[in-house]
Amino acid sequence: MSIDRREFLKFAGASTLLGLGGITAVQELLKTSAGASHVMVDEKALSAKRWAMVIDISKFKTEADYKNVVQACHSIHNVPDIGNPKDEVKWIWTDTYEHTFPGQGNEYMPEGLKHKPFLLLCNHCEQPPCVRVCPTKATFKRKDGIVMMDQHRCIGCRFCMAACPFGARSFNWRDPRPFIKEQNPEYPTRTMGVVEKCTFCFERLAKGLQPACVEKSNGGLIFGDLSDPNSEVRKVLSTHYSIRRKPEIGTQPSVYYIIGGSENA
């Protein structure tokens, strides 16, 4: 079954309600909406007060470990493979320690760690500057902390890209559809002139599923409710030292990295 973008927005709106008020709000919507058949919400939908992700770099040993995670995300979200850096669209990717954590390195750090790839994605910041600068509210933050993109509202001004200190957004300089190798009919494609990025797989959370990258990471990515002291992300963060990207900026990213020492190099 394929869906168009209008149907997807109904789905997105329902999922936003899920972030606001949990399943009860969605159930009320289903009772009254004539278009209830368009709202695909599972009773097993996952909810949280603040979603967060932990990336345990020690679990990524080979190039395939990274590739599996990136492909899982890009394939289900119809991210195009345009083939050149200038027009590149990416939701999750890798970069060096130096570029991931500028100013947090030193000349004596392990050589292996210094050159190890690190996964990067939207940080779903607690204080997201991209939301503040968007003139059309195409970028907005849900109550559960997910920073969303509504491509219907996006006018391509790219203010959000300029405001994001992490370079987590991509602009469609070209029509992306011819560059999708195998289209997933369950997720909408985008058009030229709009911005896109990771959405923490909100559409999968609404079905009770973990983000696709988490499923493919073999334990390297941990996802859960940061506000719940019994969640796995909280347990992991309470037992391991972790860092976040560019803490000095004050955006409070929801993505944490367990770096470790030489054993991770």
Image (cartoon, rainbow, N blue to C red):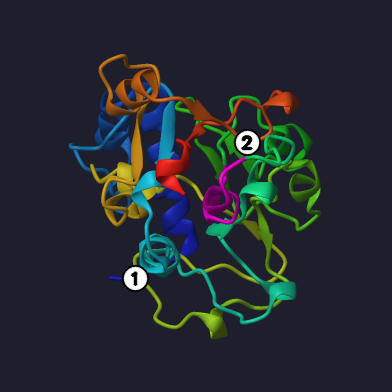
Q: Is residue 208 magenta?
A: no
- Residue positioned 39% across, 81% down in the render: 182
Residue 240 is drawn in which quadrant? top left
Which quadrant of the figure contains the N terminus? bottom left
Residue 75 is drawn in which quadrant? bottom left
Residue 183 located left or right of residue 171 = left
Does residue 140 sit above or below 7 in this rendering? Answer: above
The residue segment tinted magenta is 109-122
Q: Residue furthest top?
A: 229
Does residue 147 sit above or below 97 in this rendering? Answer: above
- Give the x, y percent position of residue 54: 41, 36
Q: Hey, what amino acid is under mark 2? A: Arg
- Residue positioned 43% across, 32% down in the render: 52
- Residue positioned 42% across, 36% down in the render: 53
Q: Residues within 10 Å of mark 2 (few under 14, many from 20)?
A: many
Label placed on residue 2 = 1
- Residue positioned 36% across, 72% down in the render: 184
Q: Nearer the viewer, residue 179 or 35?
A: 179
- Give the x, y percent position of residue 221: 36, 44
